[in-house]
Amino acid sequence: MKITVLDKISFTNGDLDLSCFDAFGAVDYYDILPKNEVAMAVKNSDIVVCNKTVFDKELIDKCPNLKFIGLTATGFNNVDTAYAKEKGIVVCNVPNYSTSDVAQHVFAFILNYTNKVSEYDQTVKQGLWKQSKTFCYFNIPLVELAGKTIGVVGYGNIGREVCKIASAFNMNVLVYNRTKKDMPYKQVDKETLLKNSDFITLHCALNEDTKCFINSESLSLMKKSAVLINTARGGVVDEPALKTALENDTIAHAYLDVLTVEPMQSDCVLYGLKNVTFTPHIAWAPTECRQRVVELVAKNISAFLNGNPINVVN
């Protein structure tokens, strides 16, 4: 088998073991290629592994030997799956690989907001503790999580894990989900969740129903003390509306791991605001999680070659 791995830099900086791919044949690795060079790299491939490279009809037609596309991600909107199926190409994704990691990132955001560890660390390094008249000082307000309300939008695997962790912190949990589900938490409508939550965290897919789910109207319903967290997809939030809300202190803070356009562009409307904290789409990026992605892609390839493909999205 001729195997081509694209977008390698998007899931490893050299810190992962990729030897599992070698069992299937000769492997060529590429980082991010310009669009006009992708076809040359993959034209003779039987198997392609990729993350964000766009496999549209034009590119698929240039790959006469292609039999399998393995995505190092859950999302597959970069592949024309219908046309791939028409051409006999199996497309497989990696679902549910980062559940605990994304939930962990949500609470890294929450604890960053409530416990101010980095801020207090800076005051100590500036010598304030040495100058203190007593054994401690608390000039930066801290927040107790117990009894606070978290609103979880979307009750898939990640949403469930966030609810479970929130319960361990003795938080009140509200859930908004498009369909009714059996759960040990209070399921409410969107308006109730927005009005009553101290923290709102988004865990829904991006589609026509959820595009700009957080907009000027929904922001106006939230508490002035509310904190918005987005580790889902950037398009779930109307970024200009969020900018206005943050500038006007309509809500207190936003923590964003995702943006509508990634990487962040020079004209990002949220850049530079004092009450927004960014991370560069890394909720899924712990080393263990990325290694798991590689191994699950290899498992998808093995299942395909054995005639029993799994995680097929077309």
Image: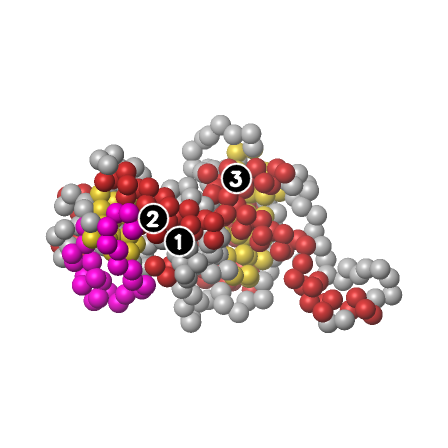
Instruction: Tell me if I can see residue 120 in this picture.
Output: yes
**In which quadrant of the rendered image does the C terminus lie?**
top left
Secondary element at tag 1? loop
Q: Earlier in the sequence, mark 2 or mark 3?
A: 2
Q: Earlier in the sequence, mark 1 or mark 3?
A: 1
Kind of residue at badge 3: Glu
Kind of residue at badge 2: Cys
What residue lies at 28% left-to-right and 41% top-to-bottom?
Answer: 302
Residue for badge 1:
17
Count the marks.
3
Residue for badge 2:
20
* Crowdedness near tag 3: few (<14), some (14–19) or many (≥20) residues, C-alpha within 10 Å: some
What residue lies at 67% left-to-right and 58% top-to-bottom?
Answer: 117
Question: Where's residue 135, x and y in %?
Answer: 84, 60
Secondary element at tag 2? helix
Are dots 1 and 2 in contact, CB under 8 Å? yes
Q: Which residues are magenta?
A: 22-46
Furthest toward the right, the residue is: 133
Q: Is residue 167 left or right of residue 206?
A: right
Q: Is residue 40 magenta?
A: yes
What residue lies at 37% left-to-right and 49% top-to-bottom?
Answer: 294
Q: Which mark is residue 161?
A: 3
Q: Is residue 219 left or right of residue 116?
A: left
Question: Where's residue 99, x and y in %?
Answer: 47, 43
